[in-house]
Amino acid sequence: MTGGAPGYFIRHFSVAALIRLAESLRASGREWPENATYNGGFFDKAMALCESMSKPVIAAISGTCLAGGFEFALSCDLRIAEDGDYLIGLPEANLGLLPGAGGTQRLPRAIGTPAALMHILLGVPLSPREAERKGLVHETVSGKALDRAMEIAHRLSSYTPESVAYIKRLVRNATETPLAQGLALERNLFLKLCISESALARMRSYEGKNITSPSRSIVVEERSVNHD
Amino acid sequence: MTESGAPVRVIEETPAYWRVRFENPPFNIVDATIFEGLQDVIARMDASPSLRVVVFESANPDFYLAHFDLTGKTGNITTAVGPSGLPILMDTFVRLTRSPVVSIAKIRGCVRGVSSEFVLACDMRFASRENTRLGQPEVGVGVNPGGGGTERLPRLVGRGRALEIVLGANDFDGGTAERYGYVNRALPDAELDGFVDGLARRIASFDRRPIAAAKNLINQVSLPSADRLLDALNAFQTALTWPETQQRIQALLKLGLQRESDFENRWPALLGTLLET
C-alpha cells in the first residue's frame, strides 16, 4: 500500500467533512452511550481485512501520514517510511478529538502503552526519522519507501505462502491469546508445516549439501599425504 | 567426465591448497550436475579448517565452463533453496564470496554468461592471454544476465565498461579483459599455471584468521546485497518466458549450440545477425 499523490501517503480525514458530519449528527439528536455496539464502517472493515488476510501487508509511507492515514498504516503488518519533510502520527488531541479509527487500540499494541500515551496525549506528529526511533514505523529509508517495500515483498514471496501465513497469524494473535493456547497452536502449525511437501523439499535441499553424505558429483584426489 | 562420472574433481594439493577441476564433456556446459558438484565442493570447503585457497580450473583448454544449459538440464537450481536461503544458483556464488577460503579462477577457453558470473564470484581471476573468450552474451540471447554479472561487473570495471560488456554481448580476449579489470591479470599461456600455483601456495602459507578477517572486511565494502542478486535472477526467469527470447534460443540451438564444437566456440560473434538467416 502506498500513496499515489507525490508527498502524501494518506494525508488525514477531511476536517471540513468532519464538521459537516458533526453538524448533521447534532441536528439528529442521536447520542452514543459508552456500551453501544459498533460493527465498523468500510474503513474499519478494510483495516480488519489487512490484519486478518493471510498475506502480509506492507505500508510504503511515501509522504504525509496523519490521523486516519496513520491509523490505516497501523493496520498493515510492516510500515516502511522514506526520509523527507513530512509528518507521521496521531494529532487528533489538538482538535479536541481522539484517534477514532483504531489509533488508541493499535498503537499501544505496536509500541507499548507508555509510548502510545505520550504520543496520542500530546498529539505532536513526528518526522519520518523520529517515527522510526519511536517505533511508529519499522524502518525509515533514505531512498524510496516503495523500493524497500518491494525488496521486502520479493523476499517474502520467495518463502512458502503457508509459513508466511502461519507466522502472521501466530504473531498477530500472540498478545490476545492465553500463553498455553498460543503455544499449542504454534506447535500444531509447526508440525503441519514440517510434514508439508514444500518445507520437506527445502529442508532436504539444505541437508543435501551436508558433507556427511558422500556425493557422486565430485571426486577427491589427495596429493597431500606426504606433505607436511 | 571423470572415470567416476563426476563433473567436478577436487585435487587436494596440500591441506591448505586445493585445485578444483571442471570435467563435464564435451563443452563443460553449466547444468545441474555442475552446480551439484560446486555445492559439494563448498560444503567440503566449509568443513575443512586447514584450507586457505582453492583454484578453480578446467580439464578442457577450450572451454573453462561454456554457458548455462539451454536444453532443460538445469534441474531445480533456480527454484530450490540452498543453505544461505537463496536459490541454489545464487547460493553457490554467494557462499563462495562469503567463504573464509580464498577462491581463484584460472581461466583458459570460453567463459560465457553464468560461467563469467561464476568467475566474477571468485575472489580473483587470472586468464590466458592467448586463449580466453570471456563475456556476458545474455542480452543477445534475449535475456539479462541473472547470476550476478550486472551486480558485480560495475564495481570491477565501472558503469560504462559494464554496459559495454553486457549490452555488446560479445567475447573479450584476455588482454582486453585485463585492461578493463574484468580479470586481475592476463598472462602468457605458458606462464599461467606457474603464476597461479605460486600465488596460491604463497597465500596458503599464511595464517587462516588474518586471511579470513581481511577478506571479510573487503567483502563488507564490495559485495552486492542478496536482494539485488535476487532481483537479477527473477528478471532472468521472467525474460526466459518471453516469446522473442525463445525464438533466439531455438535459433541458436538449431545452428549448433551445445552440439557443434566450432559453433560453440564462436557463437557470440554471430548474435548481431542471429535472426537474419
Image (tube, rainbow, N blue to C red):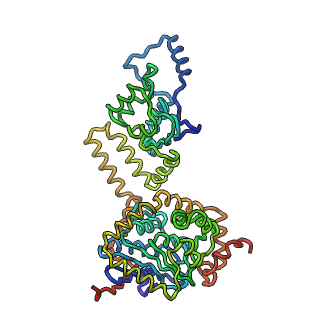
The answer to whether residue A153 is seen in the rendering is yes
Q: Residue at x 44, y 71 (%)?
A: B123
Q: Which residue is drawn at 43% across and 26% down?
A: A99
Q: Nearer the viewer, residue B136 or A174?
A: B136
Q: Position of residue B29 (x, y in %)?
A: 53, 77
Q: How many marks?
A: 0
Q: Note whether A114 is above or below B71 in the view shown.
A: above
Q: Note whether B235 is above or below A40 in the view shown.
A: below
Left or right of B174? Residue B247 is: right
The answer to whether residue A57 is seen in the rendering is no
Q: Note whether B275 is above or below A228 in the view shown.
A: above
Q: Note whether B40 is above or below A145 in the view shown.
A: below
Q: Where is residue A197 in the image (x, y as percent from the top left)?
A: 40, 60
Q: Residue at x 44, y 21 (%)?
A: A97
The residue sitting at the left extreme is A180
Q: Position of residue A170 (x, y in %)?
A: 35, 44
The residue sitting at the right extreme is B276
Left or right of B90? Residue B207 is: left
Which quadrant would residue B264 be assigned to in this image? bottom right
Q: Nearer the viewer, residue B44 or B54?
A: B54
| The C terminus of chain A - image quarter | bottom left
Q: Where is residue A192 in the image (x, y as percent from the top left)?
A: 35, 53
Which quadrant would residue B269 be assigned to in this image? bottom right
